[in-house]
Amino acid sequence: MDPVTSRRFLLVTYPRTASHLLLKILALENQPSVLPCDKDGYFFMPTVGPRFKTAGKQLDGWTKKERTMLMERHQACFGSLQKHIANGEAEGKNVYVKEHINWLTEPVSETKFVFGEESTSESPWTAQMSSDQTHSSSNKTILPDEFLASWYPTFLIRHPALVFPSTYRTTIDLNSVEKAKTDPFHLTEMTMHWSRTLYDWYCRQLEFMRRTNSGGHTWPIVLDADDIMLDREVVVQYAKMIGLDPNKLRFSWDSVANDEIEKMRKGERRMKSTIIASSGVVEGKSAQYIDIDQEAQKWKVEFGVDEGKKMEGWVRAAMPDYEYLKAKRLKV
């Protein structure tokens, strides 16, 4: 495999989509065709700190220091990702990188999403790659068009009625009940808008579609977390599509030892709580029998009436995007 044939696979996720489970099964560290990376990707995780400082603030109200800090952090993360790609090409291997879509979304798009299209006239932010790079208006990420189009993207989705309450509980556990009620991150996290927007962007890129849609496979790929949990053949088919050895997939494992758990940071321990305690796929985590009307009543009891109504609003608003993407998911 040389730089021409080495391929770049991007797993686009959002919090609580069972991405840790998928990566556990794929066992990339045992796949000879892939150059492993720390944390399975998350190259843009270092942007979370600066994002905390500006969450909920209209972009025009950011200080110069806040702007500089986030852009420099984006550029540094972009540089680290490019270095990983170069290392993969030098070794003749593919790269497979997971990123939360929220960490890739650029600030102008976030401000317009929260405060309205007319809330700022600023041009989209873009990480710098070359002098002739472009950034189309439908690209809501920090990444240049040319860079995005060089990947084979997979979108991992999960039912909003499972994802959003789980995200809310995580905020409570890591902060407090009161913090969860006012957390500005929820304005941009409790949605599937960003995943659908990027999916649609890829589908409009004619050169990308010509390059990737060969061998009977149609990209971008959509995986639903339910299928990861309930249909092993979907994972096997997906592994073949991305050049993995299906015989090296891992559907059972040893639970994480207590001393290893203690070494984890609080946030990591909370986000991986299910996977680190498991020895395989945990039953009962799918959305097979979800009824939003019934769940809404439970949320009012668990989170309080007002927060329960807020949760129901987020979930119902996200359902059209979820159903749209689910209809395009990989099937066998």
Image (tube, rainbow, N blue to C red):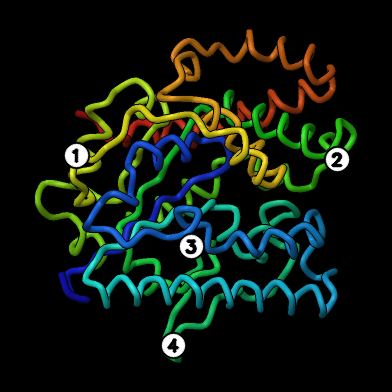
Q: Quadrant of residue 206?
A: bottom left
Q: Marks 2/1: CA distance?
A: 45 Å
Residue 206 in sight from this viewpoint: no
Q: Earlier in the sequence, mark 1 or mark 3?
A: 3
Q: Is residue 119 above or below residue 173?
A: below
Residue ranking furthest to the right:
178
Q: Quadrant of residue 281?
A: top left
Q: Nearer the viewer, mark 1 or mark 3?
A: 1
Q: Marks 1/4: CA distance?
A: 38 Å
Quadrant of the image for the N terminus?
bottom left
Q: Marks 2/4: CA distance?
A: 40 Å
Q: Is residue 239 above or below residue 209?
A: above
Would you name the residue on which mark 4 appears?
A: 130
Residue ranking furthest to the bottom:
131
Q: Nearer the viewer, mark 4 or mark 3?
A: 4
Q: Earlier in the sequence, mark 4 or mark 3?
A: 4
Would you name the residue on which mark 1 appears?
A: 246
Q: Earlier in the sequence, mark 1 or mark 4?
A: 4
Residue 72 is left or right of residue 181, and the answer is left
Q: Quadrant of residue 91?
A: bottom left
Question: Which label was assigned to residue 182?
Answer: 2
Question: Which kind of residue does numbered mark 2 sit on?
Answer: Thr
Q: Is residue 108 above or below residue 17?
A: below
Q: Marks 4/3: CA distance?
A: 20 Å
Task: List x then y, in percent, for residue 12.
Answer: 45, 50
Residue toward you, 213 or 316? 213
Q: Nearer the viewer, mark 1 or mark 4?
A: 1
Rate crowding at label 2 as few (under 14), some (14 to 19) or many (20 or more) other CA atoms within 10 Å.
Answer: few
Question: Which kind of residue does numbered mark 4 sit on?
Answer: Ser
Q: Residue at x 49, y 47 (%)?
A: 195
Would you name the residue on which mark 3 appears?
A: 138
Residue 146 is left or right of residue 293, and the answer is left
